[in-house]
């Protein structure tokens, strides 16, 4: 196996020469957005390792809630850990199960049975590509095909990008194996009944790309629908409906469709400001928002604006943007949020700060409205969430505190970090 | 003067440490999008130089049409050139004029009088900041202020970004000087009568950021207006109006406003694909478009689409996007372009290929429509262009072949390149 | 623990900023010259890991001959390996032993008992620094002190460099622990009788820096002595004694001292040609030697030269250098080698090619002399080797085929490489 | 012309890919050791420029003493300067002369006639390679040949390195042209009578590589001779003669030859410490010397040492090294310097600090001896200098204050720096 991992964007880490030198029939990649496990080179995925049967490479999306316990148990049998990512715990279990069973896919199935939490996993052995999704189906995973090659990927939009066709979603609890003969084998041993599933509803609201379908439901449709619900449930009269780019735009369009109010563009987003943006010295949060987002004065002047965003976390950015609209001459700013208020932690891969930092914690909607300086404020109603997934069972724990499986007693996020 | 120049994005070329080490009261920067002069480190601006009165730094936006002649003349007096950018020619003339006059701003004024073409120029001496705009006003240049500091910049949006207020545009033909006492001095010697001005209309259509104002006219307004004209002049019935991101969106919004047809979002743009994108091996142009742009199937399926883009150059990309919409199930695709057909070269800073490569060259609109595979095709009418600038005199040479000043006999673009 | 590892020279991998950010009371570093385990980022040391009792960092110099077996055994208990370096095998054993005993130093002692081969090991726990040397003492390891800090390092010259004083060598088979109270604890459980020791004699001849002392014996003295033995045992009359820089110089000086023949300098070494040297296109080995080494014609012209080098491996470089001397006008070139002929593999950390590539394999000295084009050739006699270590028991297996412990049945070098 | 310039070592700045992409029949390179002109990317050579007749590339070794005046004069005709290196002044004059004469070589000849000071110059036009040496011949320049290619280079050792043969030295005042037909044309217009020549004697003592010949005189021979003179003129009885590496070694050998005292090696030099060495925090000068140079205790203990170095500048390093020898147990340390004391500035390319920092300024040899802590101190006598060049006229201005041409009234070094 040839390995190349680096920090930064894919286009920075992989030169044309490097790509050319990585020849072969099978491969696995990963782009990491770290929620647990520090953002260091050691923690970069895929994890590549040797075990009793040769070489394996693993990529993992999600978050295990019993990773700490599993690590602990493994350490008590003499295991050593060179990263702080969950994948290493999974890899150990695969290696140990492999001693007992005849194939790597069986080992994957038996190993994942011990994992609690969210995992969409791709495992590559020298001759097989294996995908596994946790029984609750928290995160997406799907299969595509181009010519005679199969692809296992998180989002369907990745298939479009390379001109591959969508074959099907990996099912919650399923382990699929693509073997050397180009067959897709399925193992449903770990599956649970569909009503216990818990797809992350925030995938529909924010995480997934709008052009993806998550378990057959269009993310674009979900967001349009969220906007429509906002229009139905907390309508206000106004001159213009605008989204906070990029994630608020689809819901704004839905609101406009439902309400008949005209859709507009109020913000210009700086597409050159990214990860490596250098903060000005007196880097107030305000400065950094202004560099990323500018109001188009002509679009909003004298107008009553309905501004739609996907969520409010601490409220500071929302307050800044409302102020920017008002400075630019907006007559009124009505904020509508295409999700309910964040009130609880997520243990399954969404990076939500501690409760005390959440603006919605211990505050009424009216109190939040005052803090962000809006003329009115409305959230998506919790009972609308199921409709976003067209009835597919979801996890809405961050809004309700009720999770598909028992959360850990204490906040385990960042457990192995310093 | 402390100099730092590099290749790549600003965020790649300037580390926090480097910025910190560049202390002082006055500075000049430049981000180059090369139309003439190869994209090499030597050609990076600002040009920093020593001359008889000390140090100067120059940044130039635009294109001189007599740079070749001026270089030639200078060479015949023994001048040497270390770059292939016009700024070096301008610098020589400033240095020579400075021998005859008492101030650097006079030298700038006298030097620029010899320059034919488009230039928005910023010159920094150890104690003064000078801005100069060519008499035709091809490219924007404006003055802003934050606290006690003045800023001269191409676009007004840069002022918003840093929280500075807009003071005024530098006028066509004006040389403004900000001296050590914080005064703005103006020299209008080079000015010509306003009716001979020739602002580049493509700044309104495409170049400038939508949140900028170019000589007092909102770029956003211009694009909305362009969309409205398309709706008025070449309307077609449809279910949805969409823009090709980003530049087509505002005109699509205008079309929607004027026609009453619903505005929609049909494309997902990959914001991680930039300059450094590594082309796949069999890098068809198609592959590269697909990575950058994906159609949201749910938004377009079964719908009659009006797709608005700012221009068609060779037509290949437009054809690909039309096909992608049709593959995604669009019932009809009507293409509307918020500018007239490109038919002539630009000598003033817009990078247009040779006529033979232009799809509109020697073709009727119907022929073009067939080539791009659209169900109908409409361009902005040439007589609408003046309205985009609210009556301000413009250059529309690339559409009409008539330029505010006589173009060079031969194509001088890329003259000093290999 | 803060980790920083990189490829290249120390001065390339560690910027001043990085060094400043690595604060603490205790640290471990490593510069790798790979003999087994590919030269990749993954294999860079120190190995940093978490285990049941927290964090450990390991640096290892040497080569285990049973690493393959140990890996195999570990894999059969479910272990996974992310590198191909021996240190990972050692780390696993430390982690497992730590479950049975009360301190990390005991775990190190018990773990190393299973290791066969050469190891000089430094292990860092959050509060202790542990050094361990294999029972045969193949490679050096010593303790130094500066102010209140202790240093464990391979060579004594490192202590001089930082102004530390030499405390003592770590003994063969010893595990030393420097605890938080600044005490040095010693554990001799793994020690064997001194007559079974096997210090690598090639440390004296080539590896160690001339200004180091290896187990109390000056490397400089050993090399002077090697030169003296050559003068005694295979003298030839000549005008000048020269060394092939750098490693041949001290032996040349010894030869000169013993013989009374004048010492000279025949070669100029290019100190800018290093690791990153770019080979010319038709990169003959000759070209690359010429760039590194040039003959000083004036020093050798018309002279009978005794040229001393530390070893001959394949013979090609030696032949080139002899030719260069002759081209420069040397009347005669007599080659003397300050070690016996390489005839056997090394399993303990010296990078010797397979027997078939060794010039001395199946050849008489006279045959070798002809191949390298020398007028005479003499090697150090095997019976002189013990005198180089002043009687300390040594390993001279690469010259004799007799090793302090049974070598593996097959050549295990590079076992886990592709 | 294809240009590539970078900061750092050649092996860092030129990748194999870059070298491969630079194809052609003719080229010019430069490695800069800056004495005047800051060490910045802008000042990197060769200087590549366009002028009336096309493209030129220039590389310059040396220092002009009238560069400031010439720049000034040029600026008063409207010239602009983008670097602070002398080459730019030379380039201007070549460009201006080229307007008056028919060939570039004539222009070079006429241009250099105005230059006062030291210059060894290589000029490349698209079809010719031109070398020029100042009339005094301060710095070396020579011609070599390999197959059908000619090489113009500073030192003869560069020819050996690439397997080229030495053709001849470029003469003081000569302009040589290698034209497209492979002919060497010579222009001696600028030559002066040989007795006015002024080769830099410090080239023999320190600058040139020991394996070079400067105007036919072996540098190795010169250094051996310098050592012999020291033995003759300021002998002292001792046990060992050692050089301070690298530059003191040859003179030490000469001393040993002449005196019959044994030559030895006292120091180990760290070959990995280079330009990029990171200084420890409390970076005393002592620390930095210790990392670079370590004493071999066994070689010097109890011995009376004669330590030979090429020069003493400020005396601090010399004092440190003497102390290191004494700490290592040397019974006596006698310092001998293979050049006379530095007393005057150099205007021709040797980087000597201001007089007040020179240890020999206003001090007797005895006072210097006390400052460096040596048991005795001897310098090369000024009257020996001519013998180092075998009678060729030399410049010994830094030792005597008498220069081959009138020095500038004031210290012009670093004139254009900040």
Image: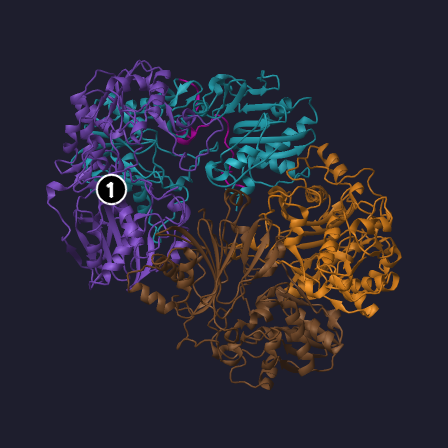
Chain colours: A brown, B orange, C purple, D cyan
Count of marks overlaid on the render: 1
Mark 1 Cα shell of 10 Å, populated few (<14), some (14-19), many (≥20): some
Q: Is residue D397 magenta?
A: yes
Question: Which contiguous range is marked in magenta?
Answer: D391-415
Tell me if residue B196 can be seen.
yes
Residue toward you, D379 or B378: B378
Image spot of residue D201 (x, y percent): 41, 26
> What residue is drawn where x is 75% and y is 58%?
B170
Helix, strand or loop under label 1: helix
- Look at the picture and state if C266 lies above or below C25: above
* Majority SS type along the magenta span: loop
Image spot of residue C264 (x, y percent): 28, 23
**Quadrant of the drawing holding the C terminus of chain B:** top right
- Look at the picture and state if B225 lies above or below B312: below
Image spot of residue C22 (x, y percent): 37, 58
Residue toward you, C305 or D334: C305
Image spot of residue C160 (x, y percent): 25, 45
Q: Chain of mark 1?
A: D
Residue placed under numbered mark 1 in the picture: D323
Image check: D350 left or right of A340?
Answer: left
Q: Is residue D411 magenta?
A: yes
Image check: B388 left or right of D197?
Answer: right
> What residue is drawn where x is 64% and y is 36%?
D74
The image quarter in which residue D156 lies: top left
């Amino acid at each position: 196996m040839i390995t190349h991992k680096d920090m930064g964007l894919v286009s920075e880490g992989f030169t044309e020469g490097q790509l050319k030198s990585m020849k072969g029939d099978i491969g696995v990649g990963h782009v990491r957005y770290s929620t647990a496990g520090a953002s260091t080179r050691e923690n970069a995925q895929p994890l590549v390792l040797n075990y009793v049967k040769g070489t394996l490479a693993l990529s993992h999306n999600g978050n295990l809630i019993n990773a700490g316990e599993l690590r602990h148990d493994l350490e008590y049998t003499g295991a050593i850990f060179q990263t702080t990512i969950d994948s290493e715990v999974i890899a150990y279990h695969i290696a140990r199960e492999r001693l007992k069973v005849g194939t790597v896919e069986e080992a994957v199935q038996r190993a994942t049975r011990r994992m609690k939490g969210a995992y969409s996993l791709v495992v590559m052995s020298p001759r097989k590509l294996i995908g596994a999704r946790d029984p609750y189906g928290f995160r997406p995973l799907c299969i595509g095909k181009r010519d005679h090659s199969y692809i296992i990927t998180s989002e369907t939009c990745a298939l479009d990008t390379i001109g591959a066709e969508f074959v099907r979603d990996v099912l919650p609890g399923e382990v699929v194996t693509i073997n050397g003969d180009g067959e897709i084998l399925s193992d449903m041993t770990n599956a649970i009944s569909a009503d216990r599933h818990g797809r992350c509803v925030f995938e529909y609201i924010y995480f997934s790309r709008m052009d993806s379908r998550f378990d057959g439901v269009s993310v674009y449709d979900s967001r349009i629908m969220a906007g429509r619900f906002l229009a139905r449930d907390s309508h206000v009269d106004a001159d213009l409906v605008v989204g906070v780019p990029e994630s608020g735009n689809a819901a704004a369009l839905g609101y406009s469709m439902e309400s008949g109010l005209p859709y507009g563009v109020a913000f210009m987003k700086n597409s050159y400001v990214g990860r490596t943006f250098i903060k000005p010295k007196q880097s107030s949060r305000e400065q950094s928002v202004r560099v990323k987002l500018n109001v188009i004065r002509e679009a909003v002047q004298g107008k009553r604006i309905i501004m739609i965003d996907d969520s409010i976390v601490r409220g500071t950015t929302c307050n800044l943007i409302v102020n920017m609209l008002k400075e630019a001459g907006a007559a009124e700013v009505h904020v509508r949020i295409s999700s309910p208020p964040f009130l609880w932690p997520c243990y399954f891969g969404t990076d939500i700060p501690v409760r005390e930092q959440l603006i919605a914690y211990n505050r009424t909607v009216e109190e939040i409205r005052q803090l962000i300086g809006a003329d009115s404020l409305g959230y998506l109603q919790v009972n609308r969430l199921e409709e976003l997934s067209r009835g597919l069972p979801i996890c809405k724990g961050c809004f309700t505190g009720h999770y598909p499986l028992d959360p850990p007693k204490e906040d385990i996020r960042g457990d192995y970090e310093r």
